[in-house]
Amino acid sequence: MSEVWKITKFFTKPYTNIPPIQHNGRTYNSPEEKATVFAEVLENSFNPHGDLYDRQIHDQIIQATTTYLLNVDSTTTTPTDPSC
């Protein structure tokens, strides 16, 4: 896309104003404030659960995978063909 077209598109494209955001009894108007509030809400909503990660199970999976990969006999393993 040429630079002239990019500039023309930028100036002719209608600007969509995002309405103010109200959060915790306060109104946020500027794009920076809205972005900050949005980021904080998402961060608080999607925190990982520490209790879902079990280090012992993780270590067992790594050990089993490593053992398998070190002991697999590649001469008896037949390659697969995605077209079959």
Image (cartoon, helix red, strand yellow):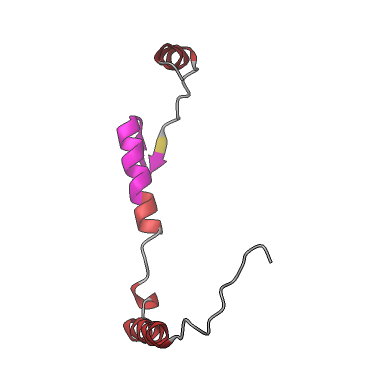
Query: Residue 41 placed where, x, y %?
Result: 37, 50
Query: Residue 18 placed where, x, y %?
Result: 45, 29
Q: Nearer the viewer, residue 44 or 14?
A: 14
> Residue 64 colored magenta?
no
Examine the image and state in which quarter residue 71 appears.
bottom left
- Residue 18 visible, this orientation: yes
* Number of marks in picture: 0
Examine the image and state in which quarter residue 33 appears.
top left
**In the displayed image of the protein, which residue is found farthest to the front?**
75
- Residue 24 visible, this orientation: no
In the rendered view, would you say 7 is above or below 32? above
Who's the residue at 40% across and 87% down the image? 64
Q: Nearer the viewer, residue 79 or 35?
A: 79
Q: Quadrant of the C terminus?
A: bottom right
Query: Residue 46 placed where, x, y %?
Result: 40, 59
Examine the image and state in which quarter residue 8 appears.
top left
Query: Residue 14 placed where, x, y %?
Result: 50, 17
* Magenta extent: 22-40
Q: Left or right: 8 with respect to 66?
A: right
**In the displayed image of the protein, which residue is found farthest to the right?**
84
Q: Nearer the viewer, residue 2 or 43?
A: 2
In the rendered view, would you say 20 is above or below 61? above
Who's the residue at 34% across and 43% down the image? 37
> Residue 24 colored magenta?
yes
